[in-house]
Image (cartoon, grey):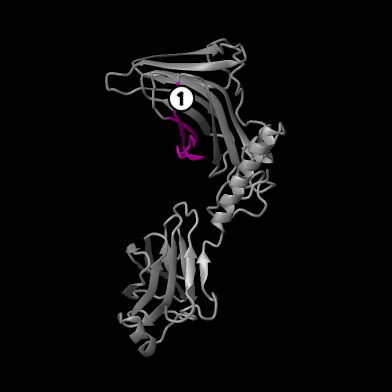
Amino acid sequence: MEGKQSALVTMGCVTGRGGQLLQKVSQPPTVGKTYTMTVMVKALREPVQLRLEIERAGRPWDRAYRGEMVTIPVGEWTPLHATFTVDKPFPEGWQAYVACFDDGGLFRADVLQLYEGTYVPWQQAATSRENLFANPSFEAGVAPWSFSPDVNRNRRRTYRRASFMLSRILANMGVGATPPLLEHFATPPGGGADAETVLRNGDLGADADANGTPDDWAVSLYAGTADTAREQLPDGAGWAQRMTIAALRDDGKGSAMLAQHDVPATAGQWYRISFRARAEGLEGVRVPVALVSTEDWQAIVEYQRFVPAAQWQDFSFLVQAKRTAEAKTRFQIWFDRVGSVWLSDIRMAPVNAPDQGRWLAGLYLDQPEEWDDPYRFFRW
């Protein structure tokens, strides 16, 4: 437009993140002064929506300005501009960009300007205002402009599709194409599938006094009508504890709890809490699981909740202990509605931190990035 060059921006599969044509300006703005950013843009294939943004060039990436989306027509150079007053210091400098969130969007950008003062047409600003942008018309190439995120989404999408097609071709030839990705997912985050549980008699198999409650466990019933029983699983593979609330108290309250006291925990240690459960009459009810201190009744691990169904299901939670306790604790699972809950095979085993192990070992051809596509470049 202005000369012989302009920037051609091609959006791929943006997946909600969008992309930004940006430049970092090392000269920090002056608090209280007014600045203007302008750009000439033209949509090429179909109209695109763009907006201007200016932010701190460092954490916490807070904005000096964030404009509204503007629809840019096809085949027509359109000015996009914003005038704003700086109300706080940006000692790290700032960066300004043209943002687009259209999947497959295609547009050109030229004559980018960032200057002190209110808006004037770009021809006038070119002669009367100091442009804080370097190489504003791309006559010297692309630098120092950049595009963020710099991951090539089209290439990533092509790799995924090529992997799918290769698997189909191999399958038609009778050749298996099982990816090692599946083997990685066979090991849960943090590992520790065989780690020793800190709960005692977690399979509920021992009941030395035959009182209907497993050894080392306690059942508390607080309701109008309630009962509990230790029952053998239908397949004979183990035991379950049933708790039933048939009616609440006259004040509308009631609860049934399976608990174990003096369960140890170490601050900072990760644990996997797992069990099998089913329920009747509790459709959609969230049942809490907790490890609490009986000294101050504060949670040692964050409360977890699950929704049991009529069929047996496996439940698993990764939790991290917030404090150390060797005794005076209570592991508990309880509910407060009319209905029945069955629990079996209850474990709380120490595991590695979930960001260790399979997630970073062998799954990616390169290191994952923050908010990265979970299927990025995996091996087939």
Residue at left 45%, top 22%?
A: 309
Residue occupied by mark 1: 308
Q: In the picture, which quadrant includes the N terminus? A: bottom left
Can residue 21 be spotted in the picture?
Answer: yes
Residue at left 32%, top 83%?
A: 117
Whole-percent x, y for residue 247 in the image: 33, 15
Q: Is residue 369 left or right of residue 41?
A: right
| Most distant residue in the right direction | 175
Q: Is residue 368 left or right of residue 241?
A: right
Q: Is residue 289 magenta?
A: yes
- For residue 199, above or below residue 2: above
Q: Give SS at disc 1.
A: loop
Q: Of 115 and 261, which appears nearest the observer? A: 115
Q: Amino acid at mark 1?
A: Pro
Q: Of 354 and 64, which appears nearest the observer? A: 64
Please give the range of residues in magenta.
287-309
Can residue 265 be spotted in the picture?
Answer: no
Whole-percent x, y for residue 58 in the image: 49, 69
